Amino acid sequence: MVGMKTLLNVSISRSIGKNLGMLFVREFGADSRTTMLKWQNERERKLKLSKEDRRKEYTRPYVPLEDIPTWKEQSKSLPDISESPSFEKLKKKCLYDIKIKEDLDFTDKVSTFVGDITKLEIDAIVNAANSSLMGGGGVDGAIHKAAGPLLKKENLNHDGCPTGEARLSGGYNIPAKYIISTVGPQCENPRELANCYKNSLQMAVDNNIKTIAFPCISTGIYGYPNEDAALVALKTVRNFLEEHGQALDRIIFCLFLEVDVGFYTSFLPVIFPKILPKEQQKKKKEIIEEVNDETES
Ligand code: ADP
């Protein structure tokens, strides 16, 4: 009798357990399907909107690409130091491990922007994420807050991201169409940091993204020294443009701290030099020689 009761109990509890399990699977499955539909639908809907219609949905101030001058324009207001001895020293410091193609001028393909990356109305912004892609502090926190909860829902499908790699998501409530999340190194590792830039740019090219902005990856919570990180960022972008320059219209270095403004402003003229047309080069050389002669005599 006791045996029968026990058997009955086991059978009932198994049946309840199974039903509960099925219910859970059904509910969980339905929930994740609904969630998936929600972010997919929203991502698709936003991507189909015209710029004007997207703008109607912004809830915060934004910065259109037209308001971000190219480095060619930005550098006009800076003194030309390209003939000074300190420039030669800077060149040695910056270019010891890279041979740049001196005849290629990318000054109209790069810009600096000082401010909040979440405001940029461009194709994609890059997030300096952590490997969970579930949000964190610094720029990651700012991007998740501005994009809204669907970014996290979409990122769940990526199942994390290893250091140096990149993952694509929709922009949701931010003006940029896409967010490319990359995970920077947590110590000074130039190869991994360069991979973040390379893989994010490759992700852009593969998805027809023409305009992209980078924060100073790894230089905040992850503690990468700002100066070295700026050199890695600029040289990696330069190398990539030399290979795939046609595929991208603008790469924006989004600077949030004064210290980075200083480093990028010093290094940009060396790594992205302005190439004067042959005639102007000749003229400039003549003027310099004239000035040198005058000072000698
Ligand atoms: P990491 O963990 O990769 O170091 P952080 O977010 O801590 O990333 O810092 C990366 C850089 O992003 C730092 O220069 C930080 O000042 C900057 N930053 C923080 N918030 C923003 C923002 N809203 N827009 C652009 N850059 C930001």
Image: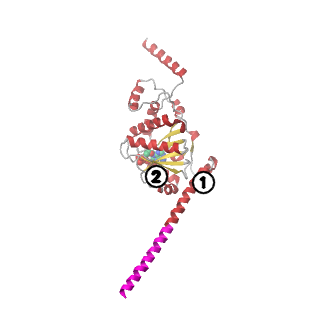
- Report whether the residue tagged 2 is closer than 8 Å to ligand 1: yes
What x and y, as percent, mark residue 159? 44, 55
Instruction: Say if 14 sits above or below 233 in the image.
Output: below
Q: Which mark is residue 141?
A: 2
Q: Which mark is residue 8?
A: none
Residue positioned 45% across, 41% down in the render: 198
Q: Main secondary structure of the magenta part?
A: helix
Farthest residue, direction top: 297
Q: Quadrant of the C terminus?
A: top left
Quadrant in the picture for residue 247: top right
Residue 195 is left or right of residue 277, and the answer is left
Residue positioned 56% across, 53% down in the render: 43
Q: Nearer the viewer, mark 2 or mark 1?
A: 1
**Stretch in magenta:** 1-27
Rate crowding at label 2 as few (under 14), some (14 to 19) or many (20 or more) other CA atoms within 10 Å: some
The kind of residue tagged 2 is Gly
What x and y, as percent, mark residue 38? 55, 59
Estimate the spatial distance between the alpha carbons at disc 2 and disc 1, rounded to whole Å: 24 Å
Q: Nearer the viewer, residue 209 or 128?
A: 209
Tag 1 secondary structure = helix
Instruction: Say if 201 sits above or below 150 in the image.
Output: above
